[in-house]
Image (tube, rainbow, N blue to C red):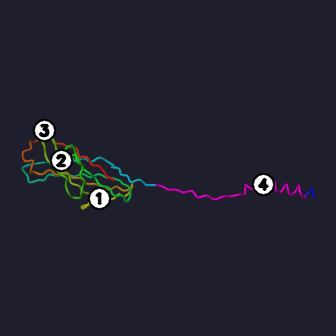
């Protein structure tokens, strides 16, 4: 009987010591991620040297384009403003925003900024294509003859601010 108790004690000891090594439990790990809506402008745009001959019919215009990258499928708009157009106005594809002024000292040339490229012609909405695909944004500066007939010769300039709203 002593032998039985010793063997039983040894078995209980072994089960107690090593039983937890063979135990298992399962737990779930929840994983989540949020992709932010974001945009970036890849390069500044410049419109240089619009040739203006006020004896001609006009308007006189030059264009440039730039690229924007935004979260895939996310809609954004571009607002345009300047020192003289202080309320940012949404670009609507193919239409212009007027009230801009090119300046040479105190002399002024009135002009409009017109959007192009991938800007929707009804809503102004542009859809992001992801950060590996450029979305082209076109911009044209258009100087009419009307309203500028008495502008003296000179070099005129202005800075237009494009703000991406997303």
CA gap, disc 1 and disc 4: 69 Å
Rendered-image quadrant of the N terminus: bottom right
Foreground pick, 67 / 9: 9
Q: Which residue is mark 1?
A: 125
- Under circle 4, the secondary element is helix
CA gap, disc 3 and disc 4: 95 Å
Q: Is residue 136 left or right of residue 52?
A: right
Task: Please state the horizontal and vertical placement of residue 160, each as a whole percent of the image.
Answer: 23, 46
Which of the marked residues, 3 or 4, is nearer the chain's N terminus? 4
**Contact check, label 3 and label 1, Cβ < 8 Å:** no
Q: Quadrant of residue 153?
A: top left
Q: Which residue is mark 4?
A: 16
- Under circle 3, the secondary element is loop
- Under circle 2, the secondary element is strand
Q: Is residue 58 magenta?
A: no
Which of the marked residues, 1 or 4, is nearer the chain's N terminus? 4
Task: Please state the horizontal and vertical placement of residue 86, each as a whole percent of the image.
Answer: 22, 46
CA gap, disc 2 and disc 4: 86 Å
Crowdedness of circle 4 by 10 Å Cα count: few (<14), some, many (20+)? few
Tell me the chief SS of the magenta region: helix
Which of the marked residues, 1 or 2, is nearer the chain's N terminus? 2
Q: Which residues are magenta?
A: 4-33
């Amino acid at each position: 009987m002593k032998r039985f108790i010793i063997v039983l004690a040894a078995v209980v000891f072994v089960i107690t010591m090593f039983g937890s090594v063979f135990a298992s439990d399962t737990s779930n790990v929840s994983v989540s991620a949020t992709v932010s809506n974001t945009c970036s402008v890849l390069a500044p745009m410049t419109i240089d040297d619009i040739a203006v001959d006020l004896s001609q019919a006009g308007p006189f215009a030059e264009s440039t384009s730039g690229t924007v990258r935004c979260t895939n499928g996310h809609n954004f708009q571009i607002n345009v403003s300047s020192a003289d157009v202080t309320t940012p106005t949404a670009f609507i594809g193919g239409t212009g925003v007027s009230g801009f002024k090119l300046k040479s000292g105190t002399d002024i040339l009135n002009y409009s900024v017109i959007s192009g490229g991938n800007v929707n012609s009804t809503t102004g909405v542009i859809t992001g294509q992801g950060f590996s695909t450029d979305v082209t944004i076109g911009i044209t500066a258009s100087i009419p003859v009307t309203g500028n007939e008495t502008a003296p010769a000179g070099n005129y300039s202005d800075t237009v601010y494009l703000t991406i709203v997303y």
